[in-house]
């Protein structure tokens, strides 16, 4: 099983950006932790980060027939990107949207996700553990026939 983990705009600034909200863990530290966790789950992962919407769309397109699932933190694109939403819908790969902070407890404009309706689940508010919960969730979803 192969899972693609995508990080959107400004996620490369983890450890620097608003540490009171996002903590001191860097993106590199987070990715290292996720690779270790993926070994525990017995799955392969690939991580990707971009500040450019089109690159994220292209990465989602390239996942078609190459990945079993996607975990995505679209970051600010959550609230603005019809293009990312449409790409997820187009490839029809089970996807979990995740956020480190509780987007429902933040500014009004952050409480609406354009991405969530085309995902199987949304997880937010658990810091870096949101990634692990999302990864575990997608793996269990893919391993279980949910129609039973």
Image: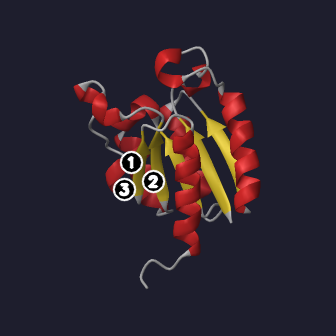
* One can see residue 9 in this view: yes
Query: Which x, y percent locates residue 89?
Result: 41, 57
**Mark 1 packing: few (<14 Cα in 10 Å), some, or many (20+)?**
many
Rendered position, 94 above or below 134: below
* Picture residue at 56% right of the left edge, 70% below the top: 142
Rendered position, 18 above or below 91: above
User: Mark 2: which secondary structure?
Assistant: helix
User: Mark 3: which secondary structure?
Assistant: helix
| Tag shown at residue 12 | none
Residue denoted by label 3: 118
Rendered position, 5 above or below 9: below
Q: Quadrant of the N terminus?
A: bottom right
Sequence order check, earlier mark of 2 and 3 = 2
- Confirm or deny contact between disc 2 and disc 1 (CB under 8 A): yes
- Confirm or deny contact between disc 2 and disc 3 (CB under 8 A): yes
| Tag shown at residue 88 | 2
Q: CA distance from mark 2 to mark 1?
A: 5 Å
- Confirm or deny contact between disc 3 and disc 1 (CB under 8 A): yes
| Tag shown at residue 85 | 1
Residue placed most toward the observer, 102 or 45: 102
* Picture residue at 59% right of the left edge, 14% below the top: 16
Q: Quadrant of the C terminus?
A: bottom left
Q: CA distance from mark 3 to mark 1?
A: 7 Å
Sequence order check, earlier mark of 3 and 1 = 1
Residue placed most toward the observer, 33 or 115: 33
**Mark 2 packing: few (<14 Cα in 10 Å), some, or many (20+)?**
many
* Picture residue at 67% right of the left edge, 43% below the top: 47
């Amino acid at each position: 099983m192969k899972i693609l983990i995508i990080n959107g705009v400004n996620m490369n600034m983890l450890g620097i950006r608003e540490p009171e909200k996002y903590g001191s863990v860097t993106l590199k530290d987070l990715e290292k932790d996720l690779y270790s966790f993926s070994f525990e789950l017995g799955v392969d992962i690939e991580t990707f980060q971009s500040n450019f919407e089109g690159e994220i769309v292209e990465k989602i397109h390239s996942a078609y027939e190459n990945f079993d699932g996607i975990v995505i933190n679209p970051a600010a694109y959550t609230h603005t990107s019809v293009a990312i939403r449409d790409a997820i819908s187009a490839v029809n790969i089970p996807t979990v949207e995740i956020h480190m902070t509780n987007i429902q407890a933040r500014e009004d404009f952050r409480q609406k996700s354009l991405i969530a309706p085309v995902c199987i689940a949304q997880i937010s508010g658990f810091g870096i553990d949101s990634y692990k919960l999302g990864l575990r969730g997608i793996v269990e979803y893919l391993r279980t026939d949910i129609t039973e």
